[in-house]
Image (cartoon, rainbow, N blue to C red):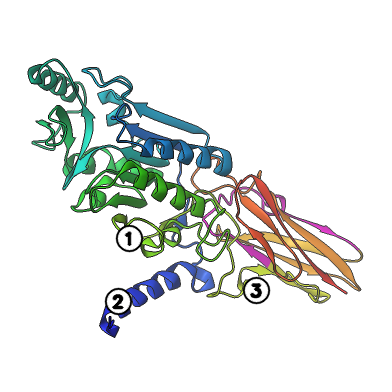
Amino acid sequence: MMISHSTIYPKFLARLILLVSLLGAHSAYAAVVYSPTKSRLNIWEPFYYDADFLGQTGNTVVARILTVSQGYTTVERFQDTFDDLNPDGCPRAAWDTFAVSAGVALVDSHGGAGEIVAIGFNGRSLGQEKSAAKKWIRSGLKPTGSTMYEEVSPSRNHWQVSVMPDWFATNWFPGFNTNRSIVILAACETATSDLLQKIGGRSRFGYSACISGVTIREDLVKLFDRMNGTKGISGPGTSRKAEIAYDFRTGYSNSFTLLENAGTTTLCPSVEHPNEDQELIDLLKPYDRYAGLKGSGYVTFDTHCDNTKPADQVLTATPSGTARVFNIKWVDDYKITFDYEATEGYTVTMKVNQSLLLAEGGAPLHLDGGSVDQDGEGEYGVAPNEDDFTWTFSQE
């Protein structure tokens, strides 16, 4: 088979533009990279009782990744546990406020072109189901026009409540945008209309076709294993940003879709990882055994951080010999600089304190640290987080 240049060039160009925008010039490292402002994962599971939703075992894995390895403090799973007329753990009030508290949000449901199913019902008659659906709709925020309505599911032959993009634009978009949320619509055809555009959030994922629960599970576990640093396109810690973890659908199902947005998102901050596109010296300085007797240094983070904490407490030095480290200060909110001097041979160990290095925005999302030796080799941002980052430089 022959592949023309016109076939491959657009993808190459798009990849190049993405890498330049996210990993290019030093001054732009964290310019568009944020973590969510909430340390909470919300999961909406209105068909929890349905054996077809095998992906919900994947939801459990996602919850464990975020809480155990990335410091998310709360997981709220809204589940309809019985196939009947009672919505159980999926009341209308919880649906209306779903976006308000979520740093990461996952909706695991049925969907279709331009809609997603909020809840389904099963009763002794279609009349009972329709009444239950109408009651659920009337019990919450008043929908505008036909943006939320009851209908008979073409696949289940039961009444359900379907929600259109314009409803989300009014009711979820503001909360997800304020929270800089990572939003995943794990339902069929949620990426075939303007639903992802209108749902809100900083990084938004959906599907362009019908998918199985097994496929969803595999996609989500891969995405969050890359974002927490345990896996990566170029090795551990190299794919912590959502767009880099997605990498033009590399390794995912064919219909898994990311809405390209103005910026990208991390689960929590780390030290910027060096890669083939950027020299280590532009990220961390100095880090070798030939640092000289006098100079300056810095550490660069991959995410906007809370720079209200004193820089000389966030970054501390342990010098030996005649070395002295001073003038430690923030430069913007993703870089700390310092000066050093000595009169003879010395060793200095620098430490970024995870307890004080948090994401900008107020959420208790701490540094995912690591350690680098004097050849620049080591670990950058591999889960779990809440560990310090250390490196050493010296003059022999």
Q: Secondary structure at mark 1?
A: loop
State how far apart marks 3 and 2 are (Cα): 31 Å
Residue 10: numbered disc: 2
Label 2 secondary element: helix
**Disc 3 on helix, strand or loop?**
helix
Q: 10 Å neighbourhood of mark 1: few (<14), some, or many (≥20)?
A: some
The residue positioned 88% from the left and 74% from the top of the image is 396
361 to the left or right of 143: right
**Residue under pointer 1:** 260
User: Contact, CB < 8 Å: mark 1 with mark 2?
Assistant: no
Residue 368 screen position, x and y as percent: 61, 50
The amino acid type found where label 2 is placed reads Pro
| Residue drawn at the location 58% of the way across and 52% of the way down | 307
Amino acid carrying label 3: it is: Ile
The structure residue drawn at horizontal position 27% and vertical position 78%, both measured from the top left corner, is 7
Query: 213 or 144, which is in the foreground?
Result: 213
Q: Nearer the viewer, residue 91 or 153?
A: 153
Q: Which residue is mark 3?
A: 281
Please tell me the numbered disc located at residue 39: none
Separation of marks 1 and 2 at Cα, in angstroms: 15 Å
Q: CA distance from mark 1 to mark 3?
A: 30 Å
